[in-house]
């Protein structure tokens, strides 16, 4: 199969931000009498505002927005331990050298996503889709469809790289090939992904004169 572009999730895919995520959401859960396990088992890969609406069902939108701003500020300021996933910088550098289009498509908001991207010292993508750009977050396909559109490509010509079950479904429903990274073995539709990897180090890209590229996983 041949492709024309990459669409990367950010947290857990390009950036290891798990310690910061655990700290922030555990603290938020504690404020609301919720266990860290209950909160963390739900939020992964979803826009924060959607997770807050889930846990704060029945409360006013004003209260939910206030909690969102509190959480967003905490996550944007706490980047301790945030670093690039192994192989991320090398792969993105290769894509830039080969002039292969790529985008970041994250459920995070601008302050949080940009803070973590900066902390990981990664190159800036041509297209950076955040929660502010979308109406329907993952697992809806809208984020990846929009990312491909902003690159001037069809999502069917793109490779999505994801770690979260919600993101995997989003990429598959957009019609993209999906590389699942550290995805749960029982993730829905995991059998439909093109490759499964633990890091980005084994991902190999070969560009052809047509501008298309082929993809392989190097053992």
Image (cartoon, rainbow, N blue to C red):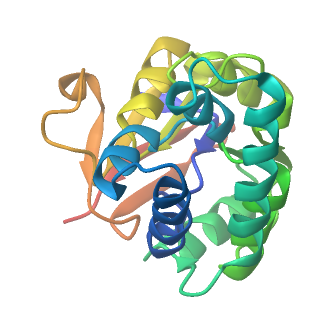
Residue 87's spot in the image, x, y percent? 46, 74
189 or 203: nearer the eye? 189
User: Residue drawn at (69%, 38%), measured in percent from left and top?
Assistant: 211
Q: Is residue 63 left or right of residue 107?
A: right
Q: Is residue 210 visible?
A: no
Name of the residue lying farthest toward the left: 185
Is 212 above or below relative to 137?
A: below
Q: Quadrant of the N terminus?
A: top left
Q: Quadrant of residue 117?
A: bottom right
Quarter holding the C terminus is bottom left
Instruction: Looking at the picture, tell me which residue is in the foreground, 119 or 91.
Output: 119
- Residue drawn at (49%, 30%), measured in percent from left and top? 2
Please indicate whether residue 76 sits to the left or right of residue 198 in the image.
right
Q: In which image quadrant can residue 52 be found?
A: top right
Indicate whether 46 appears above or below 90.
Answer: above
Residue 157 visible? The answer is yes
Image position of 20 with respect to 136: above or below: below
Query: In terms of image quadrants, where is residue 6?
Result: top right
Q: Is residue 109 left or right of residue 7?
A: right
At horizontal 66% and vertical 71% (from top left) the residue drawn is: 93
Locate residue 135, reporting x and y percent.
77, 17
- Indicate the position of residue 11 as horizontal and vertical percent values: 54, 57
Q: Is residue 62 above or below residue 216?
A: above
Relative depth, front residue between 72 and 130: 72
Please report the residue visible at 47 percent of the width from the left and 73 percent of the height from the top: 85
As drawn, the residue found furthest toward the bottom would be 80
């Amino acid at each position: 199969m041949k492709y024309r572009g990459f669409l990367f999730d950010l947290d857990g895919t390009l950036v290891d931000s798990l310690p910061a995520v655990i700290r922030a959401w555990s603290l938020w859960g504690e404020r609301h009498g919720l266990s860290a396990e209950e909160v963390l088992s739900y939020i992964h890969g979803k826009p924060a505002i959607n997770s807050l609406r889930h846990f704060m069902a029945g409360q006013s939108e004003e209260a939910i927005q206030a909690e969102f701003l509190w959480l967003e500020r905490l996550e944007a300021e706490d980047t301790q331990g945030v670093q690039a996933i192994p192989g991320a910088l090398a792969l993105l550098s290769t894509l830039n050298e080969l002039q292969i289009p790529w985008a970041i498509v994250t459920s995070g908001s601008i302050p949080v996503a940009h803070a973590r991207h900066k902390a990981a010292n990664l190159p800036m993508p041509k297209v950076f889709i955040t929660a502010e750009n979308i109406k329907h977050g993952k697992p809806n396909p809208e984020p990846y469809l929009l990312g491909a559109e902003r690159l001037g490509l069809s999502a069917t010509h793109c490779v999505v790289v994801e770690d979260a079950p919600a993101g995997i479904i989003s990429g598959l429903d957009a019609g993209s090939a999906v590389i699942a990274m550290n995805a749960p073995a029982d993730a829905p539709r995991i059998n439909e992904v093109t490759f499964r990897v633990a890091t980005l180090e084994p991902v190999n890209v070969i560009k052809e004169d047509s501008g298309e590229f082929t993809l392989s996983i190097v053992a």
